Image: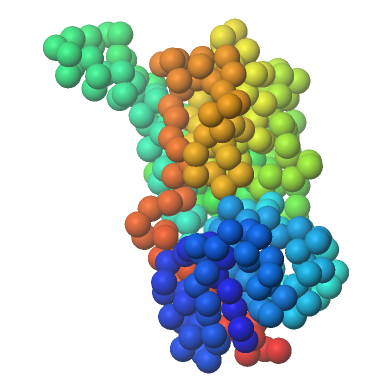
């Protein structure tokens, strides 16, 4: 097949595809206008996040057989329309599940044990022990919203902390730690989101949703920023309904996730960056040195196996 790499990914993907006889053109430097002139000649697209594969682009790409995204989410692809045209869509959540799971634990432990605050104070010669007393995970109830590759990887690592795990996934029939949202609202101390961004999950976490929890909770989001209404989250942080938040993603990110939309950083964002109750990272939970390669390795395997079966 003739394949175009629209976004840059680990070169192992190109190498494995070429080993199987495919042509891969690395044209990541081209503008969207330039790409649109070339896409009709290609049978496969390799993308990450900067390029949206819309209905119009799919119609333009008359030879297209597959779209492969290096990463977990597929929200920048019109998957339903692609499938209606017989176009296969691939992603590789297996590649960064371990990275995300470890990042979730790192953020939680940093927040609960006040590591950010204590480290900064000691560097200034301030030695506060009682004020920096931490909170243990052991004995708490940890809820996972979404139980795919990421949610299950987090559950696996939580087992050693002796917590009670509850998991809710609307689109799975039977899975470990299965619970209803009613049970999660009743018992959760920690809530971690592992969801794709869809119309259904956009602003899922809002004031009404947060107020359904019986306890005051800690919220972790390593999925997509727009799953959380930031204004409502800040309100809950101010009134104590949310005791703390670990956010690797923000609704203010640019489409490509490479930077923040500097023109759209409201008061809610200013609160987050100033609050000691919040840990922030720049959408790097799934972006380790190891996951960068694994994302491409899993993707190449899927594409090559699919081609062999055809």
Q: Where is residue 3 in the image (x, y as percent from the top left)?
A: 59, 78
Q: Where is residue 248 in the image (x, y as percent from the top left)?
A: 49, 37
Q: In which quarter of the image is the C terminus?
A: bottom right
Total numbered labels: 0
| Above or below, comparing residue 41 to residue 276 in the picture | below
106 left or right, relative to 79: left
Q: Position of residue 265 (x, y in %)?
A: 56, 23
Look at 53% across and 80% down and name the residue there: 24
Residue 138 visible in the current orientation: no
Colouring of the image: rainbow
87 left or right, relative to 266: right
| Above or below, comparing residue 307 to residue 263 in the picture | below
Q: Quadrant of the N terminus?
A: bottom right
Look at 66% across and 36% down and name the residue there: 227
Of 26 and 157, the residue lying toward us: 26
186 left or right, relative to 29: right
Look at 64% across and 82% down and name the residue there: 306
Residue positioned most to the right: 84
Q: Position of residue 290 (x, y in %)?
A: 36, 60
Of 2 and 89, the residue lying toward us: 2
Look at 69% across and 52% down and name the residue there: 75
Residue 279 visible in the current orientation: yes
Of 166 and 78, the residue lying toward us: 78
Of 119 and 174, the residue lying toward us: 119
| Above or below, comparing residue 167 to residue 97 in the picture | above
């Amino acid at each position: 097949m003739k394949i175009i790499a629209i976004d840059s990914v680990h070169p192992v993907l190109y190498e494995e595809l070429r080993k199987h006889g495919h042509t891969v053109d690395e044209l990541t430097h081209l503008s969207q206008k330039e790409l649109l002139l070339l896409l009709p000649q290609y049978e496969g697209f390799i993308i990450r996040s900067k390029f949206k594969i819309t209905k119009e682009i799919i119609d333009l790409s008359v030879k297209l057989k597959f779209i492969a995204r290096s990463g977990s989410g597929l929200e920048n692809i019109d998957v339903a329309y692609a499938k209606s045209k017989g176009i296969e869509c691939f992603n590789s959540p297996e590649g960064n599940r371990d990275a995300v799971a470890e990042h979730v634990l790192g953020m939680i432990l940093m927040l609960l044990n006040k590591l950010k605050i204590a480290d900064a104070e000691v560097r200034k010669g301030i030695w506060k022990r009682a004020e920096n007393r931490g909170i243990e995970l052991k004995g708490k109830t940890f809820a996972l919203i979404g139980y795919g590759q990421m949610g299950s990887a987090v559950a696996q690592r939580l087992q050693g902390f002796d917590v009670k795990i509850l998991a809710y996934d609307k689109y799975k029939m039977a899975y470990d730690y299965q619970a209803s949202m009613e049970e999660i609202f009743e018992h959760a101390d920690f809530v971690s989101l592992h969801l794709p961004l869809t119309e259904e999950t956009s602003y899922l976490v809002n004031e009404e949703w947060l107020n359904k929890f019986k306890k005051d909770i800690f919220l972790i989001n390593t999925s997509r920023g727009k799953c959380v209404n930031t204004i409502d989250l800040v309100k809950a942080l101010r009134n104590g309904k949310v005791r703390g938040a670990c956010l690797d993603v923000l609704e203010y990110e640019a489409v490509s996730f490479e930077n923040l939309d500097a023109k759209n950083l409201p008061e809610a964002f200013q609160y987050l960056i100033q609050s000691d109750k919040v840990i922030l990272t720049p959408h790097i939970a799934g972006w380790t040195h190891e996951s960068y390669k694994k994302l491409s390795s899993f993707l190449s395997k899927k594409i090559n196996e699919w081609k062999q079966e055809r």
